[in-house]
Image: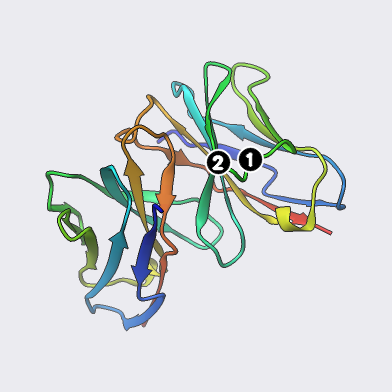
Amino acid sequence: EPEVTQTPSHQVTQMGQEVILRCVPISNHLYFYWYRQILGQKVEFLVSFYNNEISEKSEIFDDQFSVERPDGSNFTLKIRSTKLEDSAMYFCASSEAPGPNQPQHFGDGTRLSIL
Amino acid sequence: KNQVEQSPQSLIILEGKNCTLQCNYTVSPFSNLRWYKQDTGRGPVSLTIMTFSENTKSNGRYTATLDADTKQSSLHITASQLSDSASYICVVSSSGTYKYIFGTGTRLKVLA
C-alpha cells in the first residue's frame, strides 16, 4: 500500500536556527497537510496546501512557518527561527481529493527537538 | 469551540478481553468521525469512518458506534491482542474545512 514518507525521522536543531522538514506524499494525491503533536498533547492542525497555495491554516501557523512543494514529489515545512516550544512531532498527511470525507493518510512523523 | 474529548485517558486490559473507548465531541457543523490507531513512534492509521447517517461501522475486531444526537462515539475492541497496544484517537471533521480535529487519545495497554 502506498505510504507517506517523512525525513528525517529525528531532527535536532539549535534554537534560532532554520529547519526544513520533508515529506513525500502518496503519488496521486493532490492535497497536503502538516500537523504537529507536542509531547503528551493532542495532534493539532497546522496547514493544508493545494495547487501551490495554502488553502487553510491554523493560528499556530504564524510567520515563522512556511510550506512549499519545490518539485513534483516533495512537500516541505520550513520553520525559520526555531523556538524551544517548536519541539514536537510533525506529521505530514496527504489526500487524493479535498473535503472532510476524504481520508488523509499520515506519515510516521519527524521528531523535532530544539535545544 | 470545536473540541473532541476522550475517555479513559489510559486503559490496561488482559489479552483476550474486550474493551470500549469513549469519545465526546462538540464540533459543528459535523461532517464525519474517524477512529485512528497510533502505534508508538508511528503516524495515525485509520480504523473506521462514520458520517452523520451511520451509527455503527466495523473493521475486523473493531466496532465503532456514533450517536449524532448526543455527539458521542465509542470504539469497541473484541478479543484484544498484544498488538492492540497503542493510542486510539477520535478525529472529527467539520463541513467546510480541510482540517481534522483530534481528541487527546486513549492509551491502551494489552497484557499477556
- SS for dot 2: loop
Say left or right for B108 vs B57.
Answer: right
Say left or right for A38 vs B108.
Answer: right
Residue A71 figure quarter:
top right
Q: Position of residue A14 (x, y in %)?
A: 87, 52
Residue A58's disc is 2
**Up-down relation of residue B107 to residue A23 (above or below):** below
**Up-down relation of residue A74 to residue B15 (above or below):** above
Dot 2: chain letter: A
In percent of the image, x 29 and y 35: which residue is there?
A101
* Residue at image mark 1: A61
Do residues under tags 1 and 2 come within 8 Å of each other at their CB atoms? Answer: yes
Amino acid type at circle 2 is: Ser
Amino acid type at circle 1 is: Phe
Residue A109's disc is none
In percent of the image, x 54 and y 63: which residue is there?
A41
- SS for dot 1: loop
In percent of the image, x 41 and y 59: which residue is there?
B103
Dot 1: chain letter: A
Q: Position of residue B33 (x, y in %)?
A: 28, 49
Q: Are marks 1 and 2 on the same chain?
A: yes
